Amino acid sequence: MELLYEIEGSTATLTLNRPEKRNALSDNLINLLKDALHKADKDDNLRVVVIRGAGTDFCSGADLSVLQKVAEGSILDNLADAENLMKLFALIRRVKIPVIAVVHGRALAGGCGLATACDLVLATKAAKFAYPEVKIGFVPAIVAAILRRNVSEKRAFELITLGFEFDAEEAQKFGLVNQTYDEADFETGVKNYVAAYEKVSRSAVMLSKRLLYQMDNMTFEQSLQAGVDTNTIARLTEDCQTGIAKFLKKS
């Protein structure tokens, strides 16, 4: 199986399972990821989706078969291939609950794009990131819209036009990684971070994620109104009603 789907408690873990290929993204693996994300999105018992890689690396980028398609495919072949990756990145934002990339080893090219597309990124301090496409005349074009929303314009320009490698601590300073851990503390750190979502309202997190990404194409006034709408919806949820009742009882 190129992708493992495991559930522990309220967390679904999707493991890229091509360690001999450094978890390179093939068409099949991308499709499996999309199917797994759709499956997780329909499971009302889940609070978090984790994406990680088997073996020594998170993901080394495009599979050789994909690069072969770039070299030999028609315009329509390449368009379909690019759109497939785009649909994966867009889907991650549409999944109702947080999608967390757990990165060790290398996250390069499309692999770096996959991590960037996730809502949150946790990484070992030794993890390496890069968008090196420019070195072979290619462009990290599909992830650019997300990268531009994560870092400053000048930082995004630097990362996609120089293609240099940077470690997780640098990535955290750039705004691409949320938390870094020493190798020895990594699994415990990830487990504790993910477990924090057990202590907050699932519906409130879902509404917060939707609101945050909803604002991308809104004016300031529209964003404020979206906040009003979300606030009103949140007040009527079971979690909020229960939470208010408990608070009032204490006071």
Image (spheres, rainbow, N blue to C red):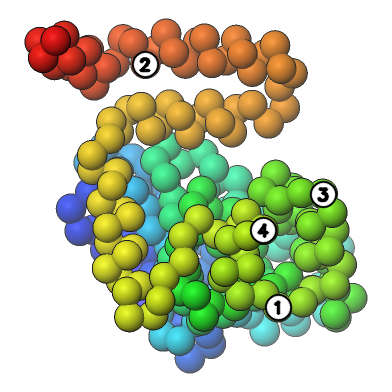
Spatial CA span between label 1 and label 2: 42 Å
Q: Total number of numbered labels?
A: 4
Task: Determine which residue is flagged by label 2.
Answer: 234
Of circles 4 and 3, which is in front? 4
Earlier sequence position, callout 3 versus callout 2: 3
- On residue 187, the disc is none
Circle 4 residue: 174
Q: Is residue 75 left or right of residue 8?
A: right
Residue flagged by tag 1: what amino acid is it? Glu
Front residue of 236 and 41:
236
Q: Secondary structure at mark 2?
A: helix
Question: Badge 3, how many Cα within 10 Å: few under 14, some, many 20+?
Answer: few
Q: Are marks 4 and 3 in contact (CB under 8 Å)?
A: no
> Looking at the picture, does residue 187 appear above or below residue 51?
below
The answer to whether the residue labelled 2 contacts the one labelled 4, judged by CB atoms less than 8 Å apart, is no
Q: Earlier in the sequence, mark 1 or mark 3?
A: 3
Residue at 75% in and 82% down: 68
SS at circle 1: loop
User: In the displayed structure, does residue 127 sit left or right of residue 222?
Assistant: left
**Residue at the spot of label 3:** 153
| Residue type (three-letter) at the residue carrying disc 2 | Ala
Q: Secondary structure at mark 4?
A: helix
- Relative to 113, say whether 224 is above or below: above
The quarter of the rendered structure image containing the N terminus is bottom left
Residue 225's spot in the image, x, y percent? Answer: 60, 10
Image quadrant assignment for residue 78: bottom right
- Contact between marks 1 and 3 (CB within 8 A): the answer is no
Camera-side mark, 2 or 4: 4
Q: CA distance from mark 4 to mark 3?
A: 11 Å
Q: Which residue is mark 1?
A: 165
